[in-house]
Amino acid sequence: MHVWGNEMKIAVGIIGILLGLVSMLQSCAVATGGSLASNHDLAGAGSVGVLVGLLFFVGGAFAFGLPLVAAIIFVVGCLFAIIAAGAFTDMKIWAIADLILAAMAFFAWRSARAARLKKSGEVPK
């Protein structure tokens, strides 16, 4: 049995940081465009998108050392993305990406925990 914990943590971290940068850039453009067009719903959704991008970035950073914390952060980012998806439809894509990264971070945590318990001789619950 091969343990994928470390490789998965690295993948989640890198992907989370890169998606954070991309989503923050896109959301800044949407927020600015919404403000210029006096579309307050779109400007607000773009601002929430910047927060979602920041959560992607923070979740990616936590994935390297604390993947369970990263999974929780990704789930929170997904919830914010769903809230903003009404006015800014691309947020649905970011919500799905958040859920995928949350699942990957959770399984990386679980795999690392099982390997640690196996090494110490305990039985994982």
Image (cartoon, rainbow, N blue to C red):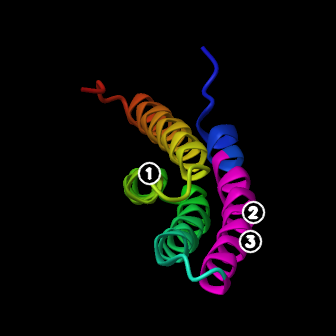
Q: Which residues are magenta?
A: 12-36
Q: CA distance from mark 3 to mark 1?
A: 18 Å
* Quadrant of the image occupied by residue 5: top right
Q: Is residue 30 left or right of residue 92?
A: right
The front one of 10 and 35 is 35
Q: Which amino acid type corresponds to the residue marked 3 in the rendered image?
A: Leu
Residues at discs 2 and 1 in contact (Cβ within 8 Å): no
Q: CA distance from mark 3 to mark 2?
A: 5 Å
Residue occupying the point 69% across, 77% down:
33
How many neighbours does mark 2 have within 10 angstroms: few (below 14), some (14-19), or many (20 or more)?
A: some
Residues at discs 3 and 2 in contact (Cβ within 8 Å): yes
The front one of 68 and 112 is 68
How many neighbours does mark 1 have within 10 angstroms: few (below 14), some (14-19), or many (20 or more)?
A: many
Residue at the spot of label 2: 22
* Quadrant of the image occupied by residue 106: top left
**Whole-percent x, y for residue 48 in the image:** 48, 71
Sequence-wise first label, 2 or 1: 2
Sequence-wise first label, 3 or 1: 3
**Residue 47 covered by magenta stretch:** no
Q: Which mark is residue 25?
A: 3
Residue at the front extreme, as displayed: 38
**Whole-percent x, y for residue 74 in the image:** 46, 53
The front one of 25 and 29 is 29
Residue occupying the point 75% across, 59% down:
18
Quick one: quadrant of the C terminus? top left
